[in-house]
Image (tube, rainbow, N blue to C red):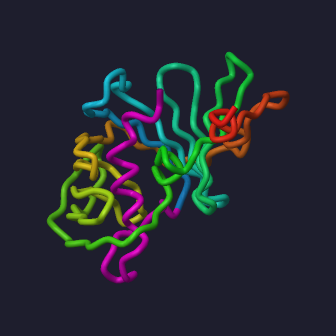
Amino acid sequence: MTRSPLLVLAALAATLVAAAPAARPVFPPSRDVAVRYEAHVEAKGAPPSFLVRYRAASEEARLDGDAGSYVLVDLRAPSARLVVPALHLIFDLPARLGLAQALSLGGESEFRRGGSETIAGLSCTVWQITSREANGSACITAQGVVLAAEGRDRAGRTGAIRAVAVSFAPEPEALFTPPAGMREVRLAAARRR
């Protein structure tokens, strides 16, 4: 499932907004972008790579794994939905899973600017991040694109992601809208039954 490789990205990204503007990296990206990441996480069954697309105008993200399903994230809400076209289902994902926070930013964090790197042909600044949710580092471009992140969340899970390809091009609105005729399932409500 798409959730596993995003644990570290979720925990680190969820920390970026809280710091004072001058003391934190830019995020979310200031323009449309698609980033292919390689993931290295402890979670069993985690896909080795995934694609994240950002649509700057609507502050939305789409995360595509290898299984044909995808996650849509509203960075403003934040909220997340797992879309499974093969089953004609959309699952509203509970906040406690951390998926909505995967690409939206919040929480209280401390940042320390480090050096710079070049990853996937782009320059980025390394930020050491300390928060209640996770500790680690992220390399982020001046446009807000996360090119690498690694760390440990408060449950002790570790992981890392690294961009292998980045494409700046307009992202079509249709990619961020689930197909018509899908049945929606609220996981929190389904669990109570």
**Residue at image location 32% in from the left, 23% down from the top:** 44
**Residue at image location 25% in from the left, 41% down from the top:** 157
Residue 11 sits inside the magenta stretch: yes
The reply, left or right, for residue 32 in relation to residue 162 is: right
Q: Quadrant of residue 187?
A: top right
Question: Relative to 86, does residue 54 appear above or below in the rendering?
Answer: below
Give coordinates of residue 152: x percent, y percent: 23, 49
Give coordinates of residue 119: x percent, y percent: 25, 47
Q: Which residues are magenta?
A: 1-30
- In depth, the one of 182 and 184 nearer the eye is 184
Residue 64 sits inside the magenta stretch: no
Residue at the front extreme, as displayed: 193
The reply, left or right, for residue 125 in relation to residue 98 is: left
Quarter of the image containing the C terminus? top right
Q: Quadrant of residue 47?
A: top left
Question: Relative to 68, does residue 24 appear above or below in the rendering?
Answer: below
